[in-house]
Amino acid sequence: MRDMVPELPPSDRTVSAEEYRLGPGDVLLGHIVAPVVQTHRLVVSVTGELVIPRFGLLSVQGMSLAQARRSVEQLVQQRHPEARVELNLLVPRRVVVTVTGYVRAPGMYVLPASVRVSTAIRIALQSGQSSVSAGQRLSLPGASSRQEVESYEWESSAIPPLPSYCTRNVLLRFADGRTQTADIERGRAMGDLTADPLVSEGLEIFVPPPPPEGYPTVSIGGAVGRMLRVAYRAGDKVSFVLRLAGGLRPEAEPVVFVHAPGQPPQRIELDTVGNPVKDLDLVPGASLLVPQRPTPGATRLGIVRVVGSVLHPGAYVIEPGRTRLREVIERAGGLAPNAALAQAYIQRVPAPWLLASDPRIPAEVGLYSRFLYSDLRLEDTVRYALDMRLQRSLVVCDFVALFQHGDTRQDVPLEDGDLIVVPTASEGIYLWGQVRLPGYVPFVPGKTVEWYVQQAGGYSVGADPKRVRVLRGPTRNWLLPEQAGAVQPGDEIYVPRRLDVPAWAQQQAELQFYTVLVGAVSTLTFVVTTIFNLLRR
């Protein structure tokens, strides 16, 4: 039995008889019923031929397993017309494959012919010697480290941690000179065997690196199996992205909205199994959104977190849009005596499916296109782009007005995922920058910025008192001392250096000063002389 059914080498999935191409070294198991049952272990020779006992020689080089079955059956039926033949792959041959490009361990690998290109790439992503490789690996350029590859981990990919651009543009060069671009994402989503073919003798696999300037993507969010963003390829359709995202969740509406850059949203109806009734070609940068079906009569609940100076910090269940701030603080036991209301804030954390299509954080092209017809300057554009990526989603709310003065207008409704932060009152004001003793200074109500600077030893050499700024509490706004007024708990005071001015600029400034001074003296002398002459007349 061990001779007839040896241990099989590893394989990544079931081999299709129509797809698998026979080659030298393949071991087949044949059952011939003509009229008695004959079982033969057949090996494809180096010339690509099968020797079938009692029936002769048959060339199967380049045939699929299904074609070989039909050819063997025709050969046997020439002698026994009523004969039946079963021919199965027993042990796949091993082939030499070269993997290069954006992988951790490029080189030559010996693999079973039953594995696919995606498996060969996974093996080449390992940092050490693979257990299925043989021979000396070539010293070929690849990714410098696994961390470099993992920088794209956020993006959906069939072979993590590779970015999907790499897995959608794998270049294959076969031994006969043919080339093909493998799209492993399509093979995984659509079951397209040709998009992730089996390896063969002499196959060269090149994994391209992601372009440094970026690449177009399409994304999907909402009531789908998982939100994702994937590299775009010409010909991508709505059905492909839906399948790649795992299809619809049970609570999904049978519709998908396609948002293309610069175009109004398009509504695509879905059938009962989640396929688009009218498939649509996508464009680079498109975003798909599948809405969630509301449940009649059901109350939607959410969770908010309260941290900081309350008696019982933790998570609390709310009814989004209806439960208000004061109610949650009361359920948390109320404010602690040392709570710093002036520094408290509410941070709104959007749902993950909203982050993928957050209008405040568009792609680079979409972001800068907002300034196409603007009269703002280039530095304004760059500053806007930076602000959009760094800003926090804060809810406008004045804790002091609500809890100390009873202003009900500040009792804002809460949403699912909100984070309520009530810091502990700080006992000091932090000074940093060009002061003699940077650090914390004990807080004294009503004192100004200048007073705190003097408590820190005064300005140090190189300080520029005209550029002092106050970093205010939770808003982190930068204020001038006259704007800030009295320093508040939680504020920070920053004293910057004088601006660095090149020597030539300093000399030019001094020259301009003396030139203006001489001009002013000359003008004054002329005016005085003119007045004196007029008086003499």
Image (cartoon, helix red, strand yellow):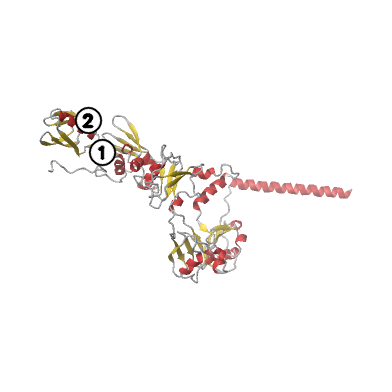
Determine which quarter of the picture holds residue 180. top left
How far apart marks 1 and 2 lie (CA) works out to 17 Å
Report the number of discs.
Answer: 2
Question: In the drawing, does residue 504 fall left or right of residue 350?
Answer: right
Q: Above or below — where is 349 with respect to 148?
A: below
Disc 1 versus disc 2: nearer the observer = 1
- Closer to the chain start, of discs 1 and 2, is 1
Q: Residues within 10 Å of mark 2 (few under 14, many from 20)?
A: some
Q: Amino acid at mark 2?
A: Gln
Counting from the top left corner in percent of width and height, residue 41 is at: 14, 37
Residue closest to the eye, 149 or 168 = 168
Determine the residue located farthest toward the left in the rendered image.
36
| Disc 1: which residue | 16
| Quadrant of the rendering where the N terminus is positioned | top left
Counting from the top left corner in percent of width and height, residue 176 is at: 29, 29
| Disc 2: which residue | 61
Taking the image as drawn, is residue 49 in sight? no
Counting from the top left corner in percent of width and height, residue 27 is at: 18, 37
Residue closest to the eye, 187 or 129 = 187
**At numbered mark 1, what does the secondary structure look like: helix, strand or loop?**
loop
**At numbered mark 2, what does the secondary structure look like: helix, strand or loop?**
loop
Counting from the top left corner in percent of width and height, residue 74 is at: 18, 29
